[in-house]
Image (cartoon, rainbow, N blue to C red):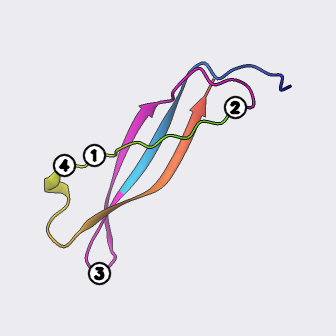
Amino acid sequence: MTTGTPVRSGTVAFGTHVIGALGIDWATVDSTVLLPTPIAPGARKRRTWTVCVDSWRVPLGMHVETREVSVRWE
């Protein structure tokens, strides 16, 4: 049995990078989504999120990579 307080709210923040053809990091686009709450103490939740970047930010020959992910909860 796990004791504790459930997670009642929180956010997941993503840092998505626009990478050029030569590997140069041209820009970072930050986005945030809400956590799927409540989460019971000791429970695990696996989620997949789609991160959207405007097409004009990713010219031909470039690609995007989400390199940073952080979570805040209460």
Q: Picture coordinates of residue 46 (x, y %)?
A: 55, 41
- Residue, x 74% and y 26% (percent of image)? 41
Question: Depth-wise, is mark 1 or mark 2 nearer the camera?
Answer: 2
Residue at the spot of label 2: 43
Q: CA distance from mark 2 to mark 3?
A: 42 Å
Marks counted in the figure total 4
Residue at the spot of label 4: 54
Task: From the viewer's perspective, tell me whether residue 33 is left or right of residue 63.
Answer: right
Q: Amino acid at mark 2?
A: Ala
Quick one: label 1, few (<14), some, or many (20+) residues within 10 Å? few
Q: Residue furthest front?
A: 1
Q: CA distance from mark 2 to mark 4?
A: 35 Å
Question: Which circle's residue, 1 or 2, is located before the other in the chain?
Answer: 2
Point out which mark residue 52 bears. 1
Q: Amino acid at mark 4?
A: Asp
Task: From the viewer's perspective, tell me whether residue 39 is left or right of residue 35.
Answer: right
Element type at mark 1: loop
For this rendering, which residue is in front, 43 or 30? 43
Q: CA distance from mark 4 to mark 3?
A: 21 Å
Question: Which circle's residue, 2 or 3, is located before the other in the chain?
Answer: 3
Question: Which circle's residue, 4 or 3, is located before the other in the chain?
Answer: 3
